[in-house]
Image: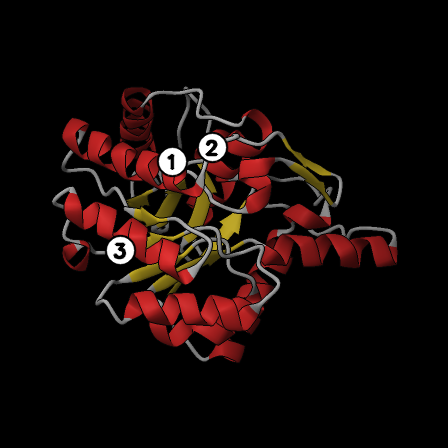
Amino acid sequence: MDLYLGVHRPTWLPLGGPPLMVSLNTLPKRKGYQAAVPWFVDSGGFTELQQHGRWRTSAAEHAERCADVMERFGMVEYLSPQDWMCEPAVIEGATIKKMHFVGTGLSVREHQERTVQNYLDLMALEPDMPWVPVLQGYSIEEYHTCADLYESAGVDLTACHRVGVGSICRRESMPEAQQIIHSLYSRGFQLHGFGFKQQGIAACWPWLRSADSMAWSYNAKEEGRKFGRTCGRPNGRGGPVKSCANCRHYALSWYERTIAKVGVA
């Protein structure tokens, strides 16, 4: 299984290390720097739906932006489409741990249909770019419904190099997450788990081809609060680390510990 280290800073791309997951929202729109590691482009969809309840960019605009990023940075392995997450808070709206979700006001089925249609649109626009179809839902049955929608549209998910699984990372029930991942794995899909924590990686790795995680950042932030200061180490750009949540030293240490604990490479 491949583990992509989720990071806040695109400036980590030329520094080497493990494969990275970087949000499109954090990438500069003009300058670029050659990536030294393979990386996965996150669409920024969680923030988009959380804050706005909709996608404010079209499929054509998304495809154009991703093509530009591939040209300027290089070494892009996978691209996230503009999928629609199906957590109740995303759909209905809520405030969870000071994070406000405006809500889309749509149904799970509508989110699934929009997710599938966006993938079809992106493939029609740029068929040679490495788009990853994403399965969305909340119950096991809903994830299989989403898979069936792709297949009804002529997409052979078993032939895709990766099939993303969304709306998993904020679940409190790990057995439920395991059941969903194992059930989808049984259909022959090469699964990527979006936004997994260390516990989720350990529980689901036998059925995942890859996953990404930014769990290290929260852990580092909490440890920094406990000690009331950062370690003061260099940040890779000539200055000291200003926030533990962006500490590359901590991130790399967490990554190595996770790989060792889970026993994957």
Q: Is residue 68 above or below residue 83?
A: above
Q: How many marks?
A: 3
Q: Which image quadrant for residue 70?
A: top left
**Is the N terminus in the top left, top right, bottom left or bottom right quadrant?**
bottom left
Amino acid under label 3? Arg
Indicate the secondary structure of the residue bearing disc 3: loop
Residues at marks 1 and 2, CA–CA distance in whole angstroms: 6 Å
Residue on which the image places disc 3? 162
Viewer-proximal residue among 257 and 248: 257
Q: Earlier in the sequence, mark 2 or mark 3?
A: 2
Measuring 21% from the left and 67% from the top, which residue is drawn there? Answer: 188
Residue on which the image places disc 2? 106
Q: Residues within 10 Å of mark 3 (few under 14, many from 20)?
A: many
Which dot, 2 or 3, sits closer to the camera? 2
Indicate the secondary structure of the residue bearing disc 1: helix
Question: Are the residues flagged by discs 1 and 2 in contact, CB closer than 8 Å?
Answer: yes
Find residue 161 and report its horizontal and vertical position in percent. 21, 56
Measuring 56% from the left and 53% from the top, which residue is drawn there? Answer: 214
Amino acid under label 1? Glu
